[in-house]
Image: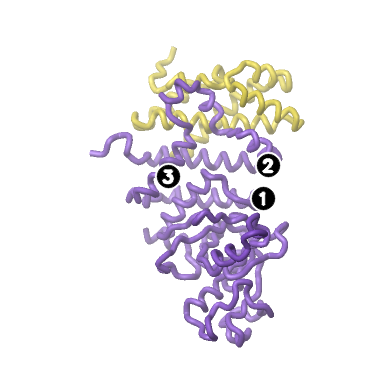
Chain colours: A purple, B yellow
Amino acid sequence: MIPAFDQPPSQKLTKLKLFLEKNKTDFVSDNHELMEWMNDRKLKVDSLSLSNISNENKSQYFESVEEKLVDQIKNLKSKDNPLASNVSKDEYDSIMEKIVDLLKLPAGQLAEDSELYLEQQLSDILGFDVLASYEDHKLLFSTGIMKASPHLKRSPTDTLEDHTNYHEAGININRSAFGWFGTGGDLSNSAIEAEKYHISLPLYYYHEWTEQSSELKKWYKFRKAVVINPVNRIAVVCSIGDIGPTTVTRKQFAGSPELIHEGKIWSPKAAGRVLVLFVDDPENKVSYGPVHFDKVFAEK
Amino acid sequence: MDNLEFINIDLFKQSYYKGMLPLTSINDFLKDFDSREIDAVTKTLISIFDVAITKTILNNLEEISDKQEFLRLTQADYSSNDIMDFLTDKFPGSEELIKQTLERTLLSAKRAIL
């Protein structure tokens, strides 16, 4: 028998916590002008009552709900609890709605509790691990708007006609800032797929860039990531194939023609808004390309 | 007095709006959960109330300086009567607004767990 303390939360409690998450997102959205001021003061609107409990009583009533939720998620990740893969339809809908709400906010990084929550839930649905931070690297923007970029030259002799689809997108006259996708003129299937589904990240804007540009380039070069379009419920597994855009005030990412089309990134409702996360795939088992959430969820 | 067997009053009394809580309805809400989860549900519900009420009040305070003053007061002591004094001074209908927000939020929470 599982001790009561170790039992997973009931579906009702999980729904209630999702409701809280939704309200928090709405709050941030409605009070954007105050968020920096509140963050400077470490003022968390969802734990005002609970943080008022005296320290003596606090040990009796343990930590705030948010901290407990974060701990639960951390425990689920570390234990690989099989119950964690049991995302209900309602939870799935709530997760997608939460991402849609987050993407309405200005481009930036996710709050830690949202990161942990989304990492766990999305990994669960997708069947592979997705991460907001990886090996001490964190994206400057996890959320933002993705512009469409042309094809990239995969090798010195590559031409637009060598690319299978979307010739109207054109081809960049320069190679990727990371170099050629293929080595010695040979293009493996993996290299072809990596160019086909690639994104550009604005590494020039990273704080570490000035002093560690070569290390950053080496680490990010063709690393696997995933772009989430929650409106159309499509994820696209991709490579980080180039550095850009050159300005980040309006658009924070760029995506290959295949990624933009197949991920429906510029569908009328999505309007370019995406969530980007790293994919933890040390054994290179996760294929590049689109993943339709509804289909994956239906198969579970 | 209604029987409020599921309510942990120590948790609920930490807020400045404690006197406006619809305790009977909250107790009914808590009845729907397994007893082992009551504390976790209570804390989640309190967080939901905190977010909803803070959001409503901020929407009703026009000046950014008033919003910041309200937030400063809540951070200093969330159970202090000074907060209601400040709100009543800024808009007289604040108590009724908080009551309505609590009731509406509880109804939304009920719908969310169905």
Q: Which residue is mark 1?
A: A106
Question: Which chain does the numbered disc 1 sit on?
Answer: A
Q: Is B63 drawn above or below residue A136 in the view shown? A: above
Please name the residue shown 52% across and 62% down the image. A226
**Which numbered disc covers residue A260?**
none
Q: Are marks 2 and 1 in contact (CB under 8 Å)?
A: yes
Pointer 3 chain: A
Give the foreground label among 3 and 2. 3
Q: Residue at x 45, y 48 (%)?
A: A91
* In the depicted structure, whether residue A283 falls above or below residue B8: below
Q: Circle 3 sits on which residue? A: A73
* Distance CA(mark 2)–CA(mark 1): 9 Å
Residue situated in front as seen by the camera: A248 or A290: A248
Label 3's element? helix
- The answer to whether the residues at label 1 and label 3 have Cβ atoms under 8 Å apart is no
**Among numbered discs 1 and 3, the one appearing first in the sequence:** 3
Q: Which residue is mark 2?
A: A32
Label 2 secondary element: helix
Q: Tell me, yes or no, whether the two marked residues, 3 and 2, touch with CB atoms within 8 Å.
A: no
